Amino acid sequence: MSKVSVSIPEDFILGAAASAWQTEGWSGKKSGQDSYLDAWYQHDRHVWHNGYGPAGATDFINRYKEDVALMKAAGLTHYRTSINWSRFLTDYENVTVDEEYARYYDNLIDEMQRQGIELMLCLEHYELPAILLEQYGGWASKKVVELYLRYAEQVFARYAHKVTRWFTFNEPIVVQTRVYLDALRWPYEQNTDKWMQWNHHKNLATAKVVKLFREKGYPGTVGTILNPEVTYPRSRAAHDVQAAQRYDLFYNRVFLDPAIKGEYPAELITLLHKHGVQWQYDEAELQLIADYRVDEVGINLYYPHRVKAPSRAWHPETPFHPAYYYEHFELPGRRMNKSRGWEIMPQIIFDMAMRIKDEYDNFPWFVAENGMGIENEAQFKNADGEIQDDYRIAFIAEHLYQTLKAREAGANCQGYMLWAFTDNVSPMNAFKNRYGLIEIDLENQRQRRMKKSAHWYRGLRDSQRLTLTLDDEWK
């Protein structure tokens, strides 16, 4: 064990993230403004932990001034959230703005500027309007791509003179993977064709939004927030290495490559064709993706993903799934967050940074999410009622160290953002696992209280230095 101290550059993002649907709640929501998540919750409330979902969330929409003050107290330089597409408009076809909801964002932006915290806004964080899923099949339809572009046009017209860092999607692969590949979430349909069509239309939508933003001459940048899983093979054997490469191809490069390189990997196209996956695209769309790449990417990193070559034959009547090429592998002796069931391996950040440096021309990026969810955090309260989350402090410190280490090694990494600023509701898990620097007390009118980690995070900002004790093997 040894003590390590590294400086945090002055221009380094030290922030936190959340989303509209996970924080705002339904206060003021009008009939017909359900998002996909709202509809899922209404259809399937029993699968959400203790039946708690987005209806109440953290009531950020009414308590944003209190929360922004806490952001300042916790030392945040930046805060990323989303605008809820389903609530920003009252008519998605005619792009009629809900002025009440839009004024809330006017006020939030002003409040954050007063407090000296930079707001970063995402246009879609699973908040596809439910009616567009019902009428058009969601992102399976080019009509939805065009409606999303018209929504983005309204958002930029209203806020682009105040907010200069924009993102088209957060984790664009997640919804269709859970619904159409794994059939784990409502409406539970295994359909690989739809999965790839959603992927493509989100890549196309990103390019169209970038084009719009640049042609309008707005100041600032447009990026996207991706969640590539740093993938390791079980062994150096060729069959395991190929399994990891194929996993990476289907789940990581399907969005990384179009966003940064402007093209799909040729091998991905070949394998989709080989397995008869039907998705519609044309050369004009591919050219648009090539011509309008993003300015930066945020990358959400939580845990490593380990795979091995499949050991069983694929059933001939089973529709194609990328799992045809891999099986999951659990490393014996791995460090675990037992609450979440995720392996803890801070080196994933350094490894991802080196990959972007070497394979993606050192493209500008930042850690957009990283965090630790823990059950029953109330057990860690001290006599004063403050949660002593030393486990979270250690987790952040190790991952932030790897981020700073990567930057020193030449990675074009702009910063680190924690998931999440406050405890908030998550799909199915609801408030079971707590991630925040700030406690949300659900049993006491959602009162807020800084955890020990919030004070520690503020200390990072004030000192511009990270000091931690590491096992020598992690240095």
Image (tube, helix red, strand yellow):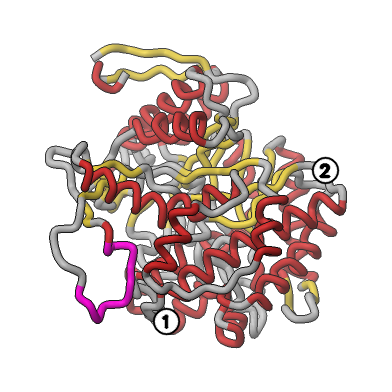
Q: Is residue 353 above or below residue 237?
A: above
Left or right: 431, with 457 as reference point: left
Q: Nearer the viewer, residue 295 or 163?
A: 295
Per the model, the C-alpha gap separating discs 2 and 1 is 40 Å
Residue 255 colored in magenta in the image: no
Label 1 CA crowd tier, 10 Å (few <14, some 14–19, many 20+): some
**What percent of the width, then of the height, locates residue 181?**
37, 70
Tell me the residue at 52%/73% (across/down). 279
The residue beneath circle 2 is 219
Label 2 CA crowd tier, 10 Å (few <14, some 14–19, many 20+): some
Determine if residue 240 is in view.
Answer: yes
Tell me the residue at 36%/71% (across/down). 48
Left or right: 47, with 147 as reference point: left
Mark 2 and mark 1 lie on one chain; the one further toward the N terminus is 1
**What percent of the width, then of the height, locates residue 341?**
24, 52
Left or right: 29, with 389 as reference point: right
**What percent of the width, then of the height, locates residue 24?**
58, 63
Q: Is residue 278 above or below residue 362?
A: below
Q: Which residues are magenta?
A: 315-324
Q: Quadrant of residue 463?
A: top right
Q: Quadrant of residue 155?
A: bottom right
Left or right: 164, with 47 as reference point: right
Q: Secondary structure at mark 1?
A: loop
Badge count: 2
Tell me the residue at 67%/70% (across/down). 145
Q: Quadrant of the C terminus?
A: top left
Q: In the image as oriented, which residue stretches furthest toward the bottom?
A: 135
**Amino acid type shown at disc 1:** Pro
The residue beneath circle 1 is 187
**Amino acid type shown at disc 2:** Pro
Residue 316 colored in magenta in the image: yes
